[in-house]
Amino acid sequence: MVTTAAKFLRSALLSLLLLPAFASAKALADYQIGETAAADITTPVALTVVDHDDTEMLRGQEAARVPVIFRFNPQAAAEAETAFRDAFAATREKFLTRLEKRFRSRKLDETFITNGQFQKFLAAFSPGGNAFPADKTLLTRWAKGESDDAMLTAFAAKLRDVANRYIRAENLPRDLMPGVRVQLIAVTNAAAAPTLEMVRHGGVEMLRMRLHTLGKARGDLLDAFTPPERPAARFLAGLLKENCTPDAELTRQSRAKQIAAILSADHYDAGQIIVRRGQTITTKHRAALAELAKELAAAQNNRTPIPWAWIALIVALPCAGFVVWQITRRQQQRSMLPVKFAGGAEQSMVIACPTCAGHIVVPAGAADGELPSCGHDHTPEHWQKRALVAEARAEQATAMVRAGLLPQIARFLTDGLVKKMVFQRAELLATQNQAAGAVDDLAGRLENLETAPDSWREFYEGRIAELEKELETKSEENRELIRTQIAIARRQMAEAQVKARWTN
């Protein structure tokens, strides 16, 4: 449990460390883009500053790579084929009805077929509206009563082949234009609203090239018919509809989920310089200074109030003890010489009692060797009582100190901050000892090195490479030690090289 005294100690240390930063927090927020830094600005705390412009750019690039989600209607092909068959049957029924009304029969023989009146009837027949445009060949077959199943089946097969493709609209919003890949989720009910979970489990991801535009699909259908069949082909092409519709809301949710973790930020360690003197304040500098000012203001607001009563008590107790000790010391060193006392017509003397150091007034004319009494009780019982009282007072004072001050001092010494400082000191000493041992080991190897020049060169170069590789993974304190080892190794390699020259 953190005591009040421990909180005070932590707050005091933090205040001392951050006091210059608190004084300049307002000045940090006043810097504007384009200004010149008047001095080096160093952060006393670790900072992570988000670069909003870079983050938005990275998120935009990543969002463009997230597949657009399309709703796919698998029933579109069957609906187009049904519409074709219904229109085909309606045109046939309308033609036969008019044929019966004109010639009193729904089936004619060859005599009527070659008759000029029938040819005029064919030329004048028009189904009208959105009916299937039957040509004269098909109308004559209907008039003869012949079957049209072969033509109907062939036309339906060509329509079905194209309608089964993945077809989208020609023009889509810019943010919904498909990229390299797209995602399809089958939706049979137009009122149903799919979710991202449904897309993740039941969606199909495919290349964009498998997604055809409506114009290309209609063109491919027209190319599947001969020129005499073009009127029927255009009618069938009109039945084609897009079966893939982009879902803007699902795509937005998918992109937001994919780019949520993308963040571009600059990290500053405690003690690192943010802006150097003379540098121009940029957008990144301005964001870092604003973040630093915010952190300092928050730290200042969250500081624990300093318990001045404890400070006064801690300072007052030693001072009071020192004053009491000085007074007692002076009383013990009081002079025993007589002091002349001016009183009345004659002069009296004041001397110290040789027994209790009290004051004795010796009147003028007193006989030698005769001293008045100081008025104190000098019996052994009196002195024993005074000694017991003094000992009781001393024990009471000691108990008060132990009950009040000593527990607080003990809590200070056992606080986590003190433990951490002691641990860091021990760790630093261990690291220094380890580095010293490594240097001694390296020096010993140099003394015992008696191989060829190529061998010691390879040894030192390999050792330096190992130290440089280790330098990349160590903390800041260990890095300084490793840099020192590298410098020593290079110096010793140079000395070995000079020694090798002399020996050769």
Image (spheres, helix red, strand yellow):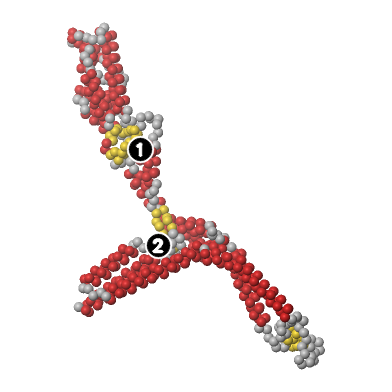
For the point 37% across and 69% down, the residue is: 434
Disc 1 is placed on an element classified as helix
- Looking at marks 1 and 2 on the same chain, the residue that comes earlier in the sequence is marked by 1
Relative to 341, 115 lies left or right: left
> Foreground: 384 or 85?
384
Number of residue marks: 2
Left/right of residue 344 with respect to residue 355 in the rendered view? right
- Residue at the right extreme, as displayed: 345
Which part of the image, by quadrant, shows the N terminus? bottom right
Which quadrant would residue 214 be assigned to in this image? top left
Residue 447, given in percent of the width and then of the height, sits at 28, 76
At 60% from the left edge and 70% from the top edge, which residue is drawn? Answer: 315
Spot occupied by residue 286 in the image (x, y as percentages of width and height):
43, 57
Q: Nearer the viewer, residue 485 or 258?
A: 485
**Image coordinates for residue 133, horizontal then vertical, percent:** 26, 20
Q: Is residue 326 left or right of residue 484?
A: right
Label 1 and label 2: CA atoms lie apart by 54 Å
User: Is there a contact, CB below 8 Å, between mark 1 and mark 2?
Assistant: no
Q: Which residue corresponds to mark 1? A: 201
Residue plotted at (27% across, 36% down): 210
**Can residue 30 be seen in this snapshot?**
no
Which residue extends farthest top? 104
Compared with residue 142, is residue 427 higher up or lower down, i.e. above or below? below
Q: What residue is disc 2 on?
A: 279
Q: Label 2 crowding class (10 Å Cα cut-off): few <14, some 14-19, many 20+?
A: some
- Can residue 315 be seen here? yes
